[in-house]
Image: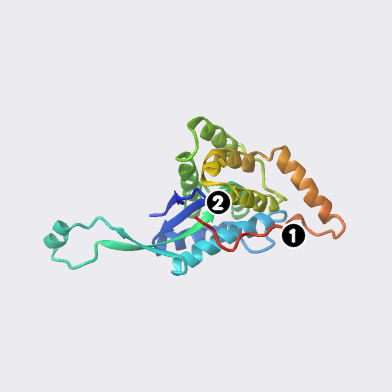
Amino acid sequence: MLTITATPNQTGVKVSGDYFDLDELNQALYKVLGPEGKYMGYEGSRMRILGVSYEIRHAAQGDRNIEFIFNGLNEHAKKKKGMIVPDKNIYYSAEVLWPEIIYTAIALKDFTQLHLKEAGGTQWDPLLHVITRFQAIVLDCLQGHVPEEEYKKVLEAFQAAPTVHDYAIQYVDFLNLRYLDMTKGQREKSLGAIAFKLAVHDQDYTAFRKQVLAAAEPTKKPIHEIAINLEYPEGIEW
């Protein structure tokens, strides 16, 4: 079963599951995102989600964390069936920064709608249920780490979030790095506010986007191709 839990230092979340859980999620992401250039104005958001997908794919390949999780098969059941089998399953996991996973959940709202419209699908499309469950467990994990009233506001903002068409994805980097610079206590206090900022496109985001657009003007590059001078630390204390 796919699970998402907060990391010890509240730096991000751990996406965990067996090989089939993670592979199913990745396949659903690939199908919803579509090939490069399919949805104009969404290439930046597509790249960011593929970045999360990359971590999940490498986790499923055993390149990240490996854990042994009790599978529910007790000694009584094994004796009754005369079976010699392990009582633990192999689970794989990878960490993702909190702002990154929240933005991924938000941006996937657009991609699921684009996929439905383009493919002529229905709400019963199995891959969409994989995506919506992923979004739901991101929010469920978030709920466990912010005050209830704050979470209600975040949930309302998530449900009414504006489109991420031509989103300044550099803002996610900005929030990631600002979040990394905080102490654990500061992260715990600011997590809800950061989630809210990602969902509502507030004045701070609007001003940031204008700066990115101004930088893009001389070169006429798409907004997502504008590089900003921000560097991630070599190691992250999850």
Crowd rating for badge 2 (residues with CA inside 10 Å; few <14, some 14–19, many 20+): many
Image: 138 above or below 155:
below
Dot 2 amino acid type: Ile
The answer to whether residue 184 is above or below residue 26 is above
Look at mark 1 in the image and give the residue it sits on. 227
Q: Is residue 62 above or below residue 4?
A: below
Residue at the (59%, 57%) spot, across then down: 49
Give whichever of discs 2 and 1 has the lower sequence position: 2
Q: Nearer the viewer, residue 78 or 125?
A: 78
Crowdedness near tag 1: few (<14), some (14–19) or many (≥20) residues, C-alpha within 10 Å:
few
Label 1 sits on a secondary structure element that is loop
Q: How is the image coloured?
A: rainbow
Mark linked to residue 101: 2
Rounded to the nearest angstrom, the CA distance separating label 2 from label 1 is 21 Å
Instruction: Give coordinates of residue 76: x percent, y percent.
Output: 14, 57
The amino acid at mark 1 is Ala
Dividing the picture into quadrants, the one containing residue 236 is bottom right
Asked which secondary structure carries label 2, the reply is helix
Q: Nearer the viewer, residue 148 or 77?
A: 148
Residue at point 50% right, 37% down? 146
| Horizontal and vertical percent position of residue 206 | 74, 42
Residue 229 appears in which quarter of the rendering? Answer: bottom right
**Which residue occupies the extreme top position in the image?**
149
- Mark number, residue 159: none
Quadrant containing the N terminus in the rendered view:
bottom left
